[in-house]
Amino acid sequence: MSVTERPAAPAGAPSDGDASGRGAAFSSAVGGEELRVVQPLIFASSRPGRRDVRFPKPSDAAQAAAASQLELPAEALRTAAARLPEVSELDLLRHFNRLSHLNHAIDLGFYPLGSCTMKYNPKVNEWAARLPGLSESHPLDPPELSQGSLEIQWLLAELLREISGMAAVSLQPAAGAQGELTGLLMARAYHRSRGEGEQRTTVLVPDSSHGTNPATATMVGYRTITIPSNERGGIDLAALREALGSDTAALMITNPSTLGMFEDQIDQVVAAVHEVGAIAYMDGANLNAILGRFRAGDAGFDVMHFNLHKTFSTPHGGGGPGAGPVGVSERLAPFLPEPVPVLVEGSPDEVKRNAWAGRTTPGARFALEAEGTREQSIGKVRAFAGNFGMHLRAYTYIRSNGDAGLREVSDDAVLAANYLRVRLTDAYDLPYDRICKHEVVFSGRRQKREHGVTTLDIAKAILDYQIHPPTIYFPLIVEEALMIEPTETESLETLDRFVAVMHEIAERAARDPAALRAAPTTTPVGRLDEASAARRPDLRHDFGTA
Amino acid sequence: MTYPDDLRYSKDHEWVRADGSTATIGITSFAADELGDIVFVELPEVGAALKQFAAFGVVESVKAVSDLFAPLSGTVSEVNARLQTEPELLNSDPFGDGWIAKVDVADGDELKALLDADGYAKLTS
């Protein structure tokens, strides 16, 4: 397949030949710009009185009763019905199905979005999450009727403990960023418990960390101090030592960093942080690179979070929600969010041995820790156990890979990134030219300088090859950054096609830069005015004067 | 690239137009170009105390969110409220209508720590 060949349009996608005009792709000159209208707004198919489901009309008595119970003040009540689109169920279904076909997804094509680990999400995860005994369980079911769900929560926490080397794990946080918040709240509670709450006011964050790290520190009330990177893409140890002091609450470090580099001075980093009595936090977002090779707990970290939707293949974005469990060292364990799933009766080793062999353990009993057990807990950060559906998928993923399989996941993720690093160095600048982990960061500065083609233009051009672009302009410390994370789930053929696409784009940048600046041309919509959309967001539908 | 001769420049890409005890500050055309289309500016409050080279506001573009670093110390006497609805002024006229704040200067000697137009042109070339 040549790199420019387009796959057949997905079934049900709009075509040019649809005589009805519904969903037809056509071009029209509006405001001097070509505008490709692909799917009209749903309001266009609205007809007065059309319905999908007809609800029985409530009796007058029921309406009167409902009205008398309304607690809203009169001025907050609608006087006219909301102008919702009025469509049949079939038209509604077609509308959203067509929209969904316009989207790019990992199930449709390559998605090397750096720092996001857009790996394939195995369908066996979905099978497990849909098992009626689990999907229909309710968090308010009594523990004696929830033993299976509780056992899986306990086992997942045990598996994450083993993977990370941390002493204890909470599954509650609903996303990586909430995991960070939970981690820093525990760090703050720890310092307060020692009478150092007032004294410790700063959080140190390397400039190659995730953008959420300084945001988390600010949310918890700390001042962020940015630590520069050295010329190898690691942390500048001298700058770190200078910034550390009795006012330091924590260091938050992303390892491997957003440059895709493993921090090879990690032992010195953790030692320096502990020397001043601060907490060492590892952002586990890039765990996909180091499974079975490096454990935060072994390196002495006090806290780390796991992004189940990255490393452990639970869905991203619209398919979410996320899940961001946190692991802690012994000294932070008293501060974990309550409640933690616990094994009340039975031997942990026996329960695990049986579970790995596909058996339950007679006599074993699981529960959520009783409220108040953990006196110093920071409290709940999420209702019940967190996003249990995600825990099921992650548990399935870990169990279906096993320990050797997980190590292979990371080995292949690192191999794929380094394959792209080596194959693309002739066409794009590589600011940190050494072996990387799961992602590789190129710079489009050569294309910008020599041909006036920016990284944004390159990213837009990639769309024309039915590939999702890499992360761009991040990390901030790389000019015109192109951050590529292929993941372990792509075939060599897919990687080779991506290499060919990137070479072709570099060649086109030299030959016909104007064409790249006009890309994409084959997508449902072309170059969007992102600046105006951000400056003056207008999300209301205008009915006009009708 | 050349820059206005009557301004002083910080290595953080802010400019100062000093006029006796008051000064106007903003970001340079180089900074605006590097940031790309700017979509939001978080201005300091009138009366806020600025410290030279410390963060005093935030600028957000389609690419990134960046701190604004004060090119000199002083007290904010006026902010450019137009930027709240027209942040694009930072791109279209960074040295003019895209000014960010006016400041009562605390220490005029701090200007000596800043670059002149030639020095800044060298820094950004």
Image: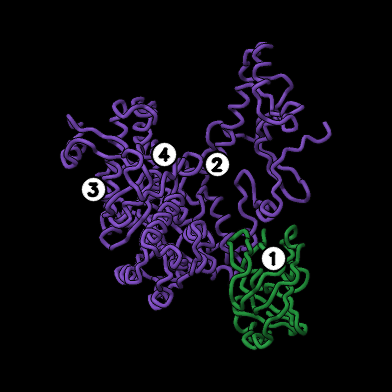
Chain colours: A purple, B green
A394 or A493, which is in the foreground?
A394
**Chain bearing mark 3:** A
- Disc nearest the viewer among 2 and 4: 4
Q: Is residue B28 above or below residue A141?
A: below
Image coordinates for residue A3, horizontal then vertical, percent:
49, 51
Could you give the CA–CA distance between mark 1 and mark 3, rounded to whole angstroms? 55 Å
Q: Is residue A312 above or below residue B40?
A: above
**Chain bearing mark 4:** A
- Disc nearest the viewer among 3 and 4: 4
Identify the residue under disc 2. A103
Q: Secondary structure at mark 1?
A: loop
Circle 3/circle 2 CB separation < 8 Å: no
Image coordinates for residue A292, horizontal then vertical, percent:
26, 54
A96 or A369, which is in the foreground?
A369
- Disc nearest the viewer among 1 and 4: 1
Could you give the CA–CA distance between mark 3 and mark 4, rounded to whole angstroms? 24 Å
Identify the residue under disc 3. A403
Circle 3/circle 4 CB separation < 8 Å: no
Could you give the CA–CA distance between mark 2 and mark 4, rounded to whole angstroms? 26 Å
- Disc nearest the viewer among 1 and 2: 1
Identify the residue under disc 4. A387
Image coordinates for residue A408, horizontal then vertical, percent:
27, 51
- Badge 1: how crowded within 10 Å, few (<14), some, or many (20+)? some
Could you give the CA–CA distance between mark 1 and mark 2, rounded to whole angstroms? 43 Å
Amino acid carrying mark 3 in the image:
Asp
Could you give the CA–CA distance between mark 1 and mark 4, rounded to whole angstroms? 41 Å
Circle 1/circle 2 CB separation < 8 Å: no
Amino acid carrying mark 1 in the image:
Glu
Q: Is residue A50 above or below residue A376?
A: above
Q: Quadrant of the C terminus of chain A?
A: top right
Q: Residue at x 54, y 66 (%)?
A: A480
